[in-house]
Image (cartoon, rainbow, N blue to C red):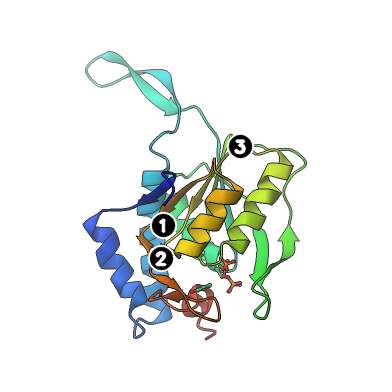
Amino acid sequence: MTSNLHISTHPLARHKLTILRNQNTEPKKFREVVRELAMMLVLEATADLQLAPLPITTPLAETTGYKLAENVGLIPILRAGLGMVEGALEILPSAQVWHIGLYRDERTLRPVEYYNKLPVSPTVQICLVLDPMLATGGSAVATVDILKRWGAQRIKFVGLIGAPEGVRRLSQAHPDVHIHLAALDDRLNDIGYIVPGLGDAGDRQFGTG
Ligand code: PRP
Ligand code: URA
């Protein structure tokens, strides 16, 4: 597997992902855990953000601290990526959120674009694509294609579960894109679902299954 793949080894990530995998977890709890996992994974994915020095005064002395020197864009892929935005914003409150609407055609498994309101040129230095599931990789590759055409330079994919097929496809199409996941699962089934996975991430968050 590509060296650009980062699987969280944090015990809390494994614990929380198990709650999502459980078919008995209700949408309310499911959404809560998606938010928490998104926060953890975004924390890991942003470990290389650039800082600028910031002189400040503490109650005891003058010192030099730090502030973020880069603007971060969060790009949730509608619908399921929406559930990851809140957790990401909790630790990156000044991030910009730009939505991309794609759904996977159930017959062809190809992504179909239905929403894109990116501004004319990039307003951020780093883009985090948020989507819980990296299955065939079609949606992630299409989103990165859109962001690169827009002019984005640094792009990372942050998801919850990946299939080997999706990781391979994304890293072959976009070797520069780092992939951050909570788990790499076994395979896709014959209708393109990740096994063991967690089912349909959109349906389970929004109660539409
Ligand atoms: C799911 C998921 C990804 C995509 C992954 O979305 O959230 O966007 O499938 O599959 P892929 O890697 O094979 O492209 P879906 O199309 O079900 O839409 P939804 O989020 O609106 O439910
Ligand atoms: N989309 C999902 O929500 N789940 C899968 O397992 C595959 C694609």
**Residue flagged by tag 2: what amino acid is it?**
Val
- How many numbered discs? 3
Q: Which residue is mark 1?
A: 38
Rendered position, 193 above or below 41: below
Q: Quadrant of ligand 1?
A: bottom right
Question: Camera-side residue: 87 or 104?
Answer: 104
Instruction: State which tag comes first along the sequence, 3 or 2.
Output: 2
Rendered position, 94 above or below 80: above
Rendered position, 73 above or below 53: below
Judged from the image, the secondary structure of the residue bearing numbered disc 2 is helix
Residue 111 position, x and y percent, is 67, 67
For the point 68% across and 50% down, which residue is it? Answer: 145
Distance, label 2 to label 1, CA atoms, is 6 Å
Q: Residue furthest top?
A: 62
Is 128 situated left or right of 87 in this image?
A: right
Q: Which residue is mark 3?
A: 124
For the point 64% across and 73% down, which residue is it? Answer: 109
> Mark 1: few, some, or many residues within 10 Å (few <14, many ≥20)?
many
For ligand 1, tell me if the residue under mark 2 lies within 8 Å.
Answer: no
For the point 35% across and 81% down, which residue is it? Answer: 25
Asked whether residue 132 is in view, the answer is no
> Mark 3: few, some, or many residues within 10 Å (few <14, many ≥20)?
some
Distance, label 3 to label 1, CA atoms, is 20 Å
Residue 34, disc: 2
**Residue flagged by tag 3: what amino acid is it?**
Val
Is 75 situated left or right of 101 in this image?
A: left
**Residue flagged by tag 1: what amino acid is it?**
Ala
